Amino acid sequence: MNQYGNAVLTRSWRRGRGLAPGSELRHRPNPGRHSRRRDLHMLVGGLLAILLASCGKPPQPVSTQPSLTVTVGTLEQVDLVRDIDAAGSVRAWEEMSLGVELTGVRVAEVRVEVGDAVRKGDVLVQLDRRTMEAELRQHEAMVAQALANEVLARANGERARAMRERKLMAAGDIEQMIASERVAEAAVLNARAALASAKLRLEFTSLRAPDDGLISARSVQPGQVIGAGAELLRLIRQGRLEWRAELPESDFLQLAVGARVAVASPAGDVEGRVRALSPSLDAVSRTGIAYVDLPQPGALIAGMFAAGRIHLAATAATMLPSAAIVERDGYRYAFVLDADDIARQRRVEVGQVSGARIEVLAGISADDRVVVRGAAFLSDGDRVRVVADDASATES
């Protein structure tokens, strides 16, 4: 491009920038830069003015119009039956180990199976009686012989006393005959005692139920030769079961004998009562055992593990409908209305649940108006509209 063309372009550019002909750009201040500084100063000043104006104003409610329709209630004083949840095992009230006093005798017959109900005196196991019957007959014969010897000795003693009066026999012979009478009487007593022992041994060949109950175990078979003291059967006395609940120290100290208990079973809860409490706590686990009698165990059987609930004596408690309590972030809250019907969130401490109500331990006073229906949809600061309890609490 020639010199003339360059001059034309320069003049055009100067006119577009608002410069007079002949002026130099490098000696003139930049108007765009000053404009940007002015705008920044105005923005900062505006923000400071807004901030200073807001510092002196009181907080305003989040909402000025009712956002929800709710019902309210207050704390109620009720008699609450407190419960303690526990777990334990089902055991036999008394389980008896049954055996016989004989040894080296063969089993002739076993008359029961596991699970059979037996009555007191029923024959459960029959041993071979032949040896014992033979011994019994032998001792009966010995008693008869001893009685005959006693009759003869008594007759000799009477003759000896008569001869002593007449002095027809030496005194030594007379005393010997009288002493023989005493020996014969002792022999009769000894024979009768041996006979009684033989009868008892014969009775031992029949193992009888010592009480009503259920057969829980069997370890004997026909033809087996048994030893003295060996366990043949196990009997749950009277068929009674009990639930043995293990409880920590804090719960155990609240119990009393006679407390009602509900034990869970596959066929529904089984009712029982605390029969006894362990006199001491376990030194390691610090737990105590409650022995709960189960008169009607139903589907429960010995050896089962079961959960249960022990009912304590009724005490006064403050309660609210469970719908009034909401859980958020792992804590429980209730909403209390102020004079302007604005909901204020309060953290509460709750206790036992009873039906549709829950115990409130802390966080709410007796004169507070607590939101019952609609609490789950509220936030702190919401304005609400209160309706009667039978109205439908829905969002406006």
Image (tube, helix red, strand yellow):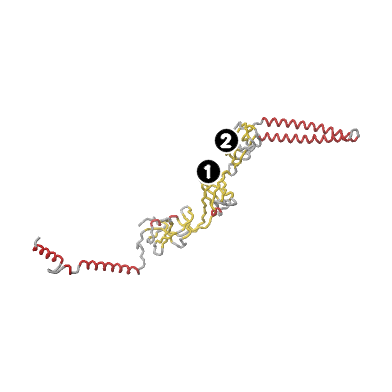
Tell me the element at label 2: loop
Residue 386, placed above or below residue 262: below
Question: Is residue 24 toward the left or the right of residue 126 in the image?
Answer: left
The quadrant holding residue 145 is top right
Q: Residue at x 87, y 35 (%)?
A: 172
- Report the residue at 12% width, 64% height from top: 10
Which label's residue is closer to the chain start, 2 or 1? Answer: 2
Q: Are marks 2 and 1 in contact (CB under 8 Å)?
A: no
Instruction: Give the x, y percent position of residue 358.
Output: 47, 55
- Alpha carbon separation for disc pair 2 and 1: 21 Å
What kind of residue is marked 1?
Met
Residue 213 lies, in percent from the top left, at 59, 40
Question: Where is the N terminus found, in terms of image quarters?
Answer: bottom left
| Residue that mark 2 sits on | 113
Q: Is residue 327 visible?
A: no
Taking depth in this image into account, of 21 and 140 the one nearest to the observer is 21
Residue receiving disc 1: 304
- Callout 2 crowding tier (Cα within 10 Å): few <14, some 14–19, many ≥20: some
Query: Residue 226 appears in which quarter of the rendering?
Result: top right
Query: Is any atom of residue 318 visible in this view?
Result: yes
Along the viewing direction, whichever of 355 and 387 lies nearer the viewer: 355
Viewport quadrant of the C terminus: bottom left
Counting every numbered tag in the picture gives: 2
Q: In this view, does 59 lie to the left or right of 128?
A: left
